[in-house]
Image: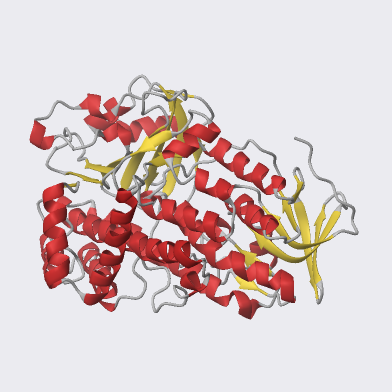
Amino acid sequence: MDETRETDKTIYDVAIMGSGIAGSMLGAILARNKVKVLLIDAAAHPKFAIGESTIPYTLVALRTLADRYDVPEIKTLATFTNSTKVLGRKYGIKRHFGYLLHHEGRPQDPREVNQFNTPPSLLHEASHLYRQDTDAYMFHTAIKYGAASRQHFRVSDIDFDDSGVTLSSAEGEQYRARYVVDASGYRSPLADKFELREEPCRFKHHSRSIWNHMVGVPRTDDLFRHSAKDTPPVPWYEGTVHHMFERGWFWVIGFDNHRDSRNPLCSVGLTLDPRRYPKPADMTPEEEFYHHAARFPDIQRQFEGARPVREWVSTGRLQYSSKRCAGDRWFLLAHAGGFLDPLFSRGLSNTAEALNCLSWRLIDAARDGDWSQERFEYVDRLQQGLFDYNDTLVNSAFISWDDYDLWTAVFRIWAWGANTGTSYLHNALAKFHKDGNDQHFKDLEDPPYPGLYWPNHDGFKSLYDEMVEQCEAYELGKVTAREAADTIYAHLERASYVPNYFGFAERKQRFLHPDLKSISKLVYWVLTEADPALKKIMLEHNKETMKAKAVGKKLF
């Protein structure tokens, strides 16, 4: 489509650098709410991007953005069904998170696997987003609502004064705005201008990555012939597959994993700790990818016969951090502010969470003219908290892959935290649907632990901290893996804010797949033994579930 061209005299309320999914969603929200917005990008759509896997929190966060800011197109991305119906049959289905631990030179042990899923009667099925189409869709949505666009514009200089911001290209072209949001990612012009990158990066976790899209990737389930008790309740390939080993993991994210798909591609990647696995000078990225796959017989078979469709990407260390993300008349959004690791699929959900708090402040600022740093300080604190908690979570997971028992403890705390965080936001959304009062969302802001899955519960914070402490103690050789796992499980078992019967506290349960029997026991436990804060969250959640089922709808 033709780009929107404005004269140099036009003054925008907000200029957004970067028209990927973060910048384009923000552009759509602002334009829909009568904010004069400009989307700037050095490239043009469609653009290749990874970060395809969604999680339940993502679904609720996207629905929150759609309903709170009246941009129904965002809701399209919140279900597999709607993504496929609106954008075409290029999207993969995600029915679970699947984890398989591998040991070098040995077949995968079916006793060392985990799967976490939510009943389809409760949750709209998540998807594997085909990002080049998803991002372009959101970009065109922003344009439809009135955002101006300027593609192929590389910002070479940003100048601030008392009344606004001037964005200039090397060719001398300029745009003027009252505020600028940098959603451009790692090569953030604002981070460069204000020297915001922390050197060294403050994050504990270290990883680098190699990735591609491929055709002909075998279905993960075809690799194994296991008994019924060792077969997961949902096929591996119908979710996001994680093949883990000491200090590394492969991802397998199929766009071709359902019968109606017309997309033959599969996103594949390898993430490694560079301190354990330095980048070899004598291998291409493709050679290194297959070198590590060959160390594990069943991972090697996962990629036999697969063919890449583009050049391989190989990175240095993925992690980077910023001293701050907000200033007078500017904000670093999402990956412009920092990045961790694609493990646990937090990228899009964290972006949506930050957008939820940033958007209403920008809309208000466009009305009253207050673009000061103070107005956006909480969004900065939230985003930094999201980075920091994701850092300690992913770092703990990488440490735990030395020992399956320790990993299962980390897995359970992640799964329960993610589940609670989803309910925490959903309950606010349900209240908003009843009365349209935006205060329900604002009441969630400024909790004691912003960025933590359950951000206002001291008990969950203590459990999370114990997980991090024990994993790091194991890494330092202060405790054995078994001692660390025992300590974490003892905490899980005595915690009245972690439910029984679902699998979150049951040490030997590999597959967290609720059925009617376990849900019935869980409800009784909630009514008789649960922590009051958990009881409140789950009863509100269950009430909405029953209402949704009564009218034949799904909860999220």
- Most extreme residue toward the front is 551
Tell me: 487 left or right of 340. Answer: left
Colour basis? secondary structure
Tell me: 395 left or right of 519. Answer: right
Picture quarter with the N terminus: top right
User: From the viewer's perspective, is residue 9 above or below residue 314?
Assistant: below
Q: Where is residue 159 in the image (x, y as percent from the top left)?
A: 80, 67
Q: Which of 523 and 26 is in front in this view?
A: 523
At 41% from the left edge and 38% from the top edge, which residue is drawn? 269
Tell me: 44 left or right of 321. Answer: right
User: From the viewer's perspective, is residue 553 above or below residue 86?
Assistant: below
How many numbered circles does the render carry? 0
At 58% from the left edge and 61% from the top edge, which residue is drawn? 333
- Decide if residue 410 is in sight here: yes
Q: Position of residue 82 (x, y in %)?
A: 48, 38
At 49% from the left edge and 58% from the top edge, which residue is drawn? 64
Q: Where is residue 339 in the image (x, y as percent from the top left)?
A: 49, 57
At 46% from the left edge and 77% from the top edge, which residue is drawn? 446
Q: Nearer the viewer, residue 363 or 465?
A: 363
User: From the viewer's perspective, is residue 167 above or below residue 364?
Assistant: above
Residue 328, quarter of the rendered image? bottom right
- Decide if residue 273 is in sight here: no
Q: Where is residue 286 in the image (x, y as percent from the top left)?
A: 44, 30
Tell me: 126 left or right of 437. Answer: left
